[in-house]
Structures are given as C-alpha cells and as structure tokens.
C-alpha cells in the first residue's frame, strides 16, 4: 500500500506542478517551490498523520516529481506523459538502494532520467514506422553493399 501511495504522489507532483506552472501562469520554479513548500509544511505540522515510512518519503517524492513538472509546454504537453514520468521516477526512487547517497542533485538526476525515458519512449512509439523504414534502409546498405 505504501508503494501505491508513493506512486500516486509522484503522479500528482509532476502533473500539479505543470498545471500550476502553465495554466495558472505562476512559472515553473515558483510552482515547484510553492507546492513543495505546502507538502513539506503539511508533513512538518502533522508528522504522525501517516506511518513513518510515508512521512519520510512522501515529501521527497513530491519534490523530485515537481522537477518533472517544471518541463516546458513546448517540450511536453500531455499530462499522460507527465503522469508516466512521475510513476517512473517513483519506481526508480523506491528501488535505487542508496545508489545516489552522497551525491548532490540526486532528485534532479532521477527526474531527468524519468522524463527522458518517457519522452524517448513516446518518440519511438509515435515514429515507429519511420524508424522501422530507416532500420531497413541501413540494414540493406550494410549487408547488401558487397554484392
């Protein structure tokens, strides 16, 4: 159940930040900072509302996925992709096993990895026929050039 709540938090962090940034015209940095402050203060004021694991990790996941929501509307316009990126961020965060301990910028790096993975997958899916044609052309040039 904790994992499900963290994934929902990751999805909300990315999509709410994007919504506040783009639709309320607050700007990416202010939207991320405002929402992260609200979530952080909430768990600071009510530390015993949820179990210790969620109280510790929910604000971190929200802040990290708010970095995903800072993406420009020129780069990414679909809430579905933001939600997927938030879920990927959360999955990586849960399973990272202290890989990023001692390094600054771990949440930003995870947000970058999740967003880039989502955008790359969306690109491949939307251009799959073009990519297949190009692979066939390259294949033919490489293997049929010796005849």
Image: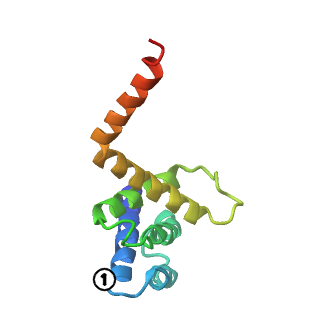
What percent of the width, then of the height, locates residue 83?
34, 62
Would residue 64 be visible to someone looking at this image? yes
Vertical order, 62 against 42 (above or below): above
The spot of residue 88 in percent (x, y) is: 42, 54
Q: Is residue 57 left or right of residue 128?
A: right
Residue that sits furthest to the right in the current view: 102
Snapshot quadrant of residue 24: bottom left
In the visual, does 22 lie left or right of 102? left
Q: Which residue is drawn at 40% across and 55% down?
A: 119
How many marks can you see?
A: 1
Q: Looking at the image, which residue is at 33% across and 59% down?
A: 81
Report the residue that reaches farthest toward the front: 147
Q: Which of 71 and 123 is in front in this view?
A: 123
Nearer to the camera, 105 or 45: 105
Query: Which colour scheme appears in the figure?
Result: rainbow
- The residue labelled by disc 1 is 23
Q: In this view, does 6 lie above or below 17?
A: above
Residue 140 found in image quarter: top left
Question: Residue 120 appears at what percent x and percent y?
Answer: 41, 50
Image location (x, y in percent) of residue 48? 47, 75
6 or 127: nearer the viewer: 127
The residue sitting at the top extreme is 147
The quarter of the image holding the C terminus is top left
On the rendered image, what quadrant is the N terminus found in?
Answer: bottom left
Tell me the element at label 1: loop
Res. 1 visible in picture: no
Residue at (68% x, 65% y) in the render: 104
Image position of 116 with respect to 135: above or below: below
Question: Within 10 angstroms of label 1, few (less than 14), some, or many (20 or more) residues?
Answer: few
């Amino acid at each position: 159940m904790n994992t499900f709540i963290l994934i929902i938090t990751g999805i909300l962090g990315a999509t709410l930040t994007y919504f506040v940034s783009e639709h309320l015209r607050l700007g990416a940095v202010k939207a991320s900072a405002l929402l992260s402050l609200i979530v952080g203060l909430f768990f600071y004021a009510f530390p015993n509302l949820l179990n210790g694991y969620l109280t510790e990790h929910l604000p971190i996941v929200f802040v990290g996925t708010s970095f995903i929501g800072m993406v420009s509307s020129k780069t990414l316009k679909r809430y579905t992709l933001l939600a997927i990126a938030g879920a990927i961020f959360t999955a990586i965060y849960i399973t990272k096993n202290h890989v990023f301990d001692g390094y600054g910028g771990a949440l930003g790096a995870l947000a970058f990895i999740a967003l880039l993975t989502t955008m790359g997958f969306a690109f491949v899916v939307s251009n799959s026929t073009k990519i297949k044609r190009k692979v066939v052309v390259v294949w033919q040039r490489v293997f049929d050039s010796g005849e």
